[in-house]
Amino acid sequence: MPTPSSSKPKRDTLNLRVPANDRSLIDRAAASMGKTRTDFILDAARRAAEEALLDRALMLVSPQAYNEFLDLLEAPAEPNDRLIRTMHTKTPW
């Protein structure tokens, strides 16, 4: 018998007003992935929220580290086996 701590966390309600065309599109996409509408929307919203927050991540570095980083960005790429293979691979399209 599962203990209260091992059961799924309680979910809160979030109400959305969605145009019929959008709801139909979401339902089709959710079904194609074998998910419920709720799980599909939660996954998409969670990914969007994480991306929005990660895009605003602040990295503090010393002036020396920042200058070294800029130098690396401005330096020409040095060919390596993987880059050479990639450049010689025929594109699939």
Image (cartoon, helix red, strand yellow):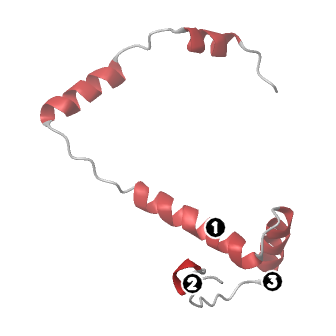
First in residue order: circle 3 vs circle 1: 3
Image depth: mark 3 or mark 1 in front: 1
Residue depicted at 21% across the width and 46% down the height: 60
Q: Position of residue 11 (x, y in %)?
A: 58, 86
Secondary structure found at label 3: helix
Packing grade of label 3 (10 A; few <14, some 14-19, many >=20) is: few
Q: In the rendered structure, are the residues bearing label 2 and label 3 in contact, judged by CB atoms less than 8 Å apart?
A: no
Q: In which quarter of the image is the N terminus?
A: bottom right
The span from disc 3 to disc 1 (Cα, nearest Å) is 21 Å
- Between the residue at mark 1 and the residue at mark 2, the CA separation in whole angstroms equals 26 Å
Residue bearing mark 1: 43
Task: Look at the picture and state if 62 lies above or below 85.
Answer: below
Residue visible at 78% across and 79% down in the picture: 23
Q: Quadrant of residue 68?
A: top left
Q: Mark 3 points at which residue?
A: 20
* Quadrant showing the C terminus: top right
Residue 37 at what x, y percent from top left?
A: 75, 77
Vertical position of residue 73 compared to residue 20: above or below: above
Task: Name the N-terminal-most of marks 2 and 3.
Answer: 2
At label 3, which amino acid type do we have? Ala
Secondary element under disc 1, as helix, strand or loop, is helix
The residue where tag 2 is placed is 3
Tag 1–tag 2 contact (CB < 8 Å): no
Q: 87 or 31: nearer the eye?
A: 31
Q: Is residue 61 above or below residue 91?
A: below
Q: Where is residue 70 in the image (x, y as percent from the top left)?
A: 28, 27
* Left or right: 14, with 70 as reference point: right
Q: In this rendering, would 93 be left or right of 69?
A: right
Which amino acid type is marked by label 2? Thr
Whether pointer 3 and pointer 1 mark residues with C-beta atoms closer than 8 Å, the reply is no
